[in-house]
Image: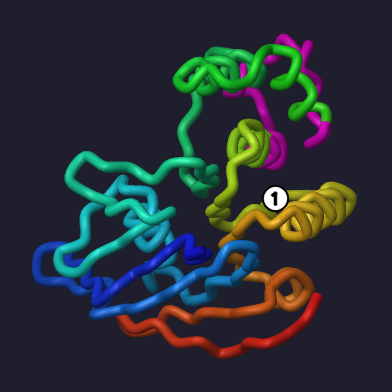
Amino acid sequence: MNNTVIEIKNVTKKFYKTTVLSNINLSVKKGELIGIVGQNGSGKSVLYKLICGLMLPTEGQIRVNNKNIGNGSFAEDIGIMLDNTGFLENETGFHNLKYIASIQNIIDCTQIKEYMELVGLNSEEKKPVKKYSLGMKQRLRFAMAIMEDPGLLLLDEPFNAIDKEMNKAMKAILMDYKKMGKTILITSHNQEDIDILCSRVIKLEAGGLYEIMAGITL
C-alpha cells in the first residue's frame, strides 16, 4: 500500500521575475510530523498554499493523497492553519466555524462547540471576532484546522500569540494526532517547538529545500 501523503516533484514557483521556490522535491509519509523552517519570505506559506491547491506551481507536480493538485483540483482530507486566515469579523467565533463547517457538512454544532472548548474558547461567547485578542484568533484558527478531523494538517506558525498553558495543550493534541497516524507539517520561528514535536526538519532557503534533521523517535 502506498503510504505517501504528499509528493512534490521538481516544483518551481515564480512571481513575475522572482523565484520563491526552485525545483524542490519532497516526499511525506503518513504519520510524519515535519517541521518547516526558514526566514520570513523564504516560501513557507507559499509551499503550504501549493500543497492545498490555493496556488499553482510555475513548474512541477504536486500530489496529495494520490491525487494531482492544481488546475481546479484541491487537496482533500486536509486542515489548514494559515497566519493570515481571514474571519467574518462581525460574527462570533462559533458562527465563523459553523459557516466553514457548512461547506462539507460533516460535523454538527455540538462537535463545533466541543472543538472550541478543546482550544479554550467559549462557544456561547457573543463577542464578535473583531474584538478577539490575537491569541483568541489563533485558537480559533487552530480549531478551524482540526475540527473536521482531517488526516493531513498544515499549520503555519500555530503557536504565535499563544500563552504557555495553551501552547502545552496544543502540543499534546498534535502528539496524540501523530500517534493516531495523522500527517502534520508545522512552521515555527521557535526552535524549541520544532525540537519537541518534529522527527524531520526541512529548511527553505534561497529557493531551495534541505533536510537538516531526521530519524528522531518521539
**Would you name the residue on which mark 1 appears?**
161
Residue 7 picture quarter: bottom left
Residue 217, by quadrant, is bottom right
Image position of 211 with respect to 154: above or below: below
Query: In the visual, does 211 lie left or right of 111?
Result: left
The residue at 82%/27% (across/down) is: 117
Q: Which residues are magenta?
A: 118-139
Say how the picture is coloured.
rainbow
- Find residue 29 and report its horizontal and vertical position in percent: 54, 68
- Residue placed farthest to the front in the image? 1
> Seen in the image, is 58 located left or right of residue 80?
left
Q: How far from the left and from the top, in percent, is residue 107?
A: 63, 20
Q: Dot 1, how many residues are within 10 Å of its Cα: few (below 14), some (14-19), or many (20+)?
A: some
Quadrant into which the C terminus falls:
bottom right
Q: Name the amino acid type tagged 1.
A: Ala
Front residue of 67 and 205: 67
User: Which of the 4 quarters of the picture holds residue 141?
Assistant: top right
Residue at image location 82% in from the left, 34% down from the top: 118
Q: Is residue 22 left or right of residue 173?
A: left
Q: Is 131 covered by the magenta stretch? A: yes
**For residue 69: magenta?**
no
